[in-house]
C-alpha cells in the first residue's frame, strides 16, 4: 500500500510539473500539489482545514492563503493546459465539445449564482453555470476551459458585481454562445488540433453561434430544437414581380420554411449503436436530411 501511494504521488508530480513551472512563486509550487492531492486523494472532507491536517500539518495558513487570498496570474496556467491537452488527445480525429457545467449552490452570494437551468440536474435550480470546452479523442476527454456565465440579474446590478469582486473586464453581459466563441478563439490561437466542433441544442439554437463556427471555417455539428425552421436544400432566392406597390428590395425564398421535425416526418430512420456504456449499448435512432437553416431576417411571403 505504501509503495502504491508513493507511486501515485510521483505520477501526480510528473503530471503537475509543467503547471507548477508556470506558478512562479516557491510557496505556490509547494502548496499546489498538496491541494490537488487533498481534492483527489482519500478523505471525505475536502475543505482546506481537514486537507491541511491530513497532508500538511502546521502549514494550514500557507495552504489557506494559496486558495483564499493568493493573487496570481491564471493565463500562463490556462495556456499550459491547452498545450498539455493537445499533447494528450489533440489531432485531426479529435473533437471539441462545447457544453454547460452546472454547480448547485445555496444562498445568493457566490458569483453568478441564480435560479437557472442546471443540465446536471435536468431542471431549473439555484446554481452557477459555466461554459465548458472539452477536447476528446476516442473515449478520453480533457477539459480545457471553464468560463463562468453571469445571468442578467448579476450584470444589471453594478453594486452587486463590485461587492462580489468581479473584475471590471467581466462585468459586461455576454451570452453563453458568445463566451463559447471567445474561448474557442483562444483555443484556436494556441494551436490546439481538432477536426470537429460539437454542441447541444442550448448552443445550436443560436444563429450567431452557428454562423460564428462557419466564419471560422470549422467543421461542426450541433443540436437544434425541433421547432427550428429550415428550407429544402434546393430552395432558391427569387425576385418576385410585385403586382402593385413598391418593388422588393431583397429576394425571397421560393419555398416556405418548415419546422425541423416536419422536415424529418417522411425520412427513413435507422438505429445505430456506437459503444458500450455502463448500462449496455449506447444507441439511438438517426435520420439524415439535407436542409438550409432559415437564419435570415423574417419576411412575409405570399403564395
Image (cartoon, rainbow, N blue to C red):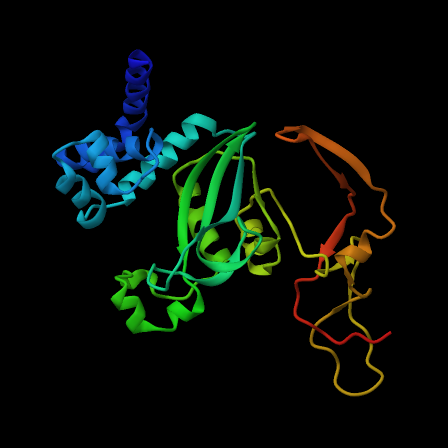
Q: Is residue 210 visible?
A: no
Residue 37 picture quarter: top left
Percent of width and height locating residue 184: 46, 47
* Front one among 160 and 89: 160
Q: Looking at the figure, which quarter contains the N terminus?
A: top left
Residue 80 picture quarter: top left
* Front one among 71 and 80: 71
Percent of width and height locating residue 230: 74, 59
Q: Is residue 53 left or right of residue 271?
A: left
Picture layout, residue 186 above or below residue 127: above
Residue 95 picture quarter: top right
Identified at 88% across, 50% down, the residue is 266
Identified at 28% across, 73% down, the residue is 159
Percent of width and height locating residue 109: 33, 63
Q: Is residue 198 visible?
A: yes
Report the number of discs: 0
* Front one among 236 and 278: 278
* Front one among 12 and 220: 12
Q: Is residue 87 left or right of residue 70?
A: right
Identified at 52% across, 46% down, the residue is 98
Q: Is residue 57 left or right of residue 229?
A: left
Amino acid at each position: 500500500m505504501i509503495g502504491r501511494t508513493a507511486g501515485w504521488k510521483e505520477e501526480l508530480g510528473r503530471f503537475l510539473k509543467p503547471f507548477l513551472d508556470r506558478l512562479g512563486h516557491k510557496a505556490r509550487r509547494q502548496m499546489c500539489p498538496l491541494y490537488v492531492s487533498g481534492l483527489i486523494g482519500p478523505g471525505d472532507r475536502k475543505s482546506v482545514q481537514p486537507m491541511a491536517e491530513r497532508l500538511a500539518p502546521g502549514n494550514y495558513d500557507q495552504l489557506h492563503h494559496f486558495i483564499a487570498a493568493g493573487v496570481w496570474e491564471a493565463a500562463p496556467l490556462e495556456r499550459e493546459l491547452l498545450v498539455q491537452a493537445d499533447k494528450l488527445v489533440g489531432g485531426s480525429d479529435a473533437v471539441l465539445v462545447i457544453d454547460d457545467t452546472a454547480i448547485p449552490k445555496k444562498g445568493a452570494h457566490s458569483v453568478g449564482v441564480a435560479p437557472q437551468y442546471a443540465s446536471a440536474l435536468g431542471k431549473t435550480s439555484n446554481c452557477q453555470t459555466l461554459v465548458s470546452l472539452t477536447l476528446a479523442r476516442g473515449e478520453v476527454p480533457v477539459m480545457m476551459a471553464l468560463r463562468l456565465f453571469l445571468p442578467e440579474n448579476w450584470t444589471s446590478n453594478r453594486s452587486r458585481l463590485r461587492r462580489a469582486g468581479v473584475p471590471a473586464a467581466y462585468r459586461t453581459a455576454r451570452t453563453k454562445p458568445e463566451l463559447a466563441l471567445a474561448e474557442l478563439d483562444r483555443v484556436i490561437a494556441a494551436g490546439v488540433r481538432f477536426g470537429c466542433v460539437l454542441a447541444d441544442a442550448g448552443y445550436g439554437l443560436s444563429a450567431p453561434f452557428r454562423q460564428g463556427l462557419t466564419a471560422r471555417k470549422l467543421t461542426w455539428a450541433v443540436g437544434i430544437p425541433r421547432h427550428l425552421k429550415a428550407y429544402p436544400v434546393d430552395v432558391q432566392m427569387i425576385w418576385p414581380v410585385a403586382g402593385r406597390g413598391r418593388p422588393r428590395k431583397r429576394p425571397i425564398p421560393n419555398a416556405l420554411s418548415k419546422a425541423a421535425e416536419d422536415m424529418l416526418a417522411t425520412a427513413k430512420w435507422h438505429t445505430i449503436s456506437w459503444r458500450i456504456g455502463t448500462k449496455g449499448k449506447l444507441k439511438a435512432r438517426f435520420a439524415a436530411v439535407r436542409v438550409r437553416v432559415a437564419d435570415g431576417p423574417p419576411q412575409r411571403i405570399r403564395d
